């Protein structure tokens, strides 16, 4: 008579633990991703998409008005003085320049520029050495582009970050 092989209980075998480890690892990873998703903030999602859409529509109209007027603006900065030279010269007494910082919202600037001569507007500003998304607004028109404080740049009719160095095509 032959002796039967001695069998060990299943929990002492390596293969059941290998089969259990894969799904268990996936469950742990799933809960970790869920925790990150629940506690992380998505800054790309806005709470007011309708209002943003209305502002975009207004920006389109303002860019079209600037295009009809043939406006362009040369922006420069030297020793804390920001200058904007518009061609052709509008009649606005004040202009608003919004400079959006590329890295942090706290670096954004909203400047009010005052007319110092026909077509020339100025304001004082402390700027970071970054490439800003610039939007210049008058009463019913807007120009936009990318601008770095150490490089004079021309702003053209456009939306948001568009433009900067050349006119926009229709």
Image (cartoon, grey):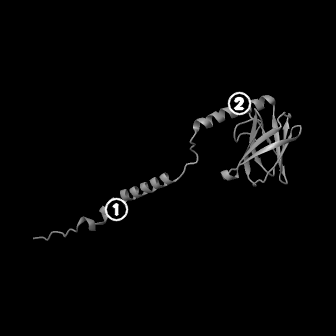
Q: Residues within 10 Å of mark 1 (few under 14, many from 20)?
A: few
Q: Residues within 10 Å of mark 2 (few under 14, many from 20)?
A: some
Task: Choose between 112 and 17: the one closer to the eye.
Answer: 112
Locate residue 144 relative to residue 51 in the image: left or right.
right
> Quarter of the image containing the C terminus?
top right
Query: Which residue matches tag 1?
Result: 18
* Residue 107: x %, y % from top left: 70, 52
Rendering quarter of residue 27: bottom left
Rendering quarter of residue 146: top right
* Residue 136: x %, y % from top left: 76, 40
* Residue 122: x %, y % from top left: 84, 45
Query: Does dot 2 land on a helix, a strand or a loop?
Result: helix
In the image, residue 124 sits, relative to residue 118, either above or below, namely: below
Residue at the limit of the structure toward the left, as seen here = 1
The structure residue drawn at horizontal position 23% and vertical position 67%, both measured from the top left corner, is 9
The structure residue drawn at horizontal position 81% and vertical position 52%, both measured from the top left corner, is 150
Rendering quarter of residue 11: bottom left
For discs 1 and 2, the disc positioned in front in the rendered view: 2
Give the mark nearest the N terminus, 1 or 2.
1
* Residue 13: x %, y % from top left: 28, 66
In the image, residue 20 sits, relative to residue 155, either above or below, namely: below
Query: Which residue matches tag 2?
Result: 61
> Quarter of the image containing the N terminus?
bottom left
The structure residue drawn at horizontal position 68% and vertical position 32%, both measured from the top left corner, is 58
Q: Can I make out residue 169 in this image?
A: no
> Distance from label 1 to label 2 (Cα)?
64 Å
Query: Does dot 1 land on a helix, a strand or a loop?
Result: helix
Task: Choose between 130 and 167: the one closer to the eye.
Answer: 130
Task: Choose between 80 and 163: the one closer to the eye.
Answer: 80
Q: Can I make out residue 79 in this image?
A: yes
In the image, residue 95 sits, relative to residue 15, either above or below, namely: above
């Amino acid at each position: 008579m032959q002796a039967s092989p001695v069998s060990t209980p299943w929990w002492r075998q390596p293969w059941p633990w290998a089969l259990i480890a894969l799904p268990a690892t996936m469950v742990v990873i799933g809960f970790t991703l869920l925790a990150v998703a629940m506690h992380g903030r998505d800054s790309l999602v806005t709470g007011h998409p309708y209002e943003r859409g209305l502002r975009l529509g207004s920006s389109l109209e303002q860019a079209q008005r600037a295009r009809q007027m043939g406006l362009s603006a040369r922006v420069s900065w030297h020793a804390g003085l920001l200058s904007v030279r518009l061609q052709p010269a509008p009649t606005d007494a004040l202009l608003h320049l919004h400079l959006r910082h590329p890295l942090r919202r706290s670096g954004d600037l909203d400047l009010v520029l005052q007319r110092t001569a026909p077509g020339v507007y100025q304001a004082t500003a402390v700027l970071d050495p970054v490439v800003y998304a610039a939007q210049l607004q008058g009463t019913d028109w807007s120009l936009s582009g990318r601008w770095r404080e150490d490089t004079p740049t021309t702003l053209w009719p456009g939306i948001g970050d568009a433009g900067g160095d050349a006119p926009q095509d229709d």
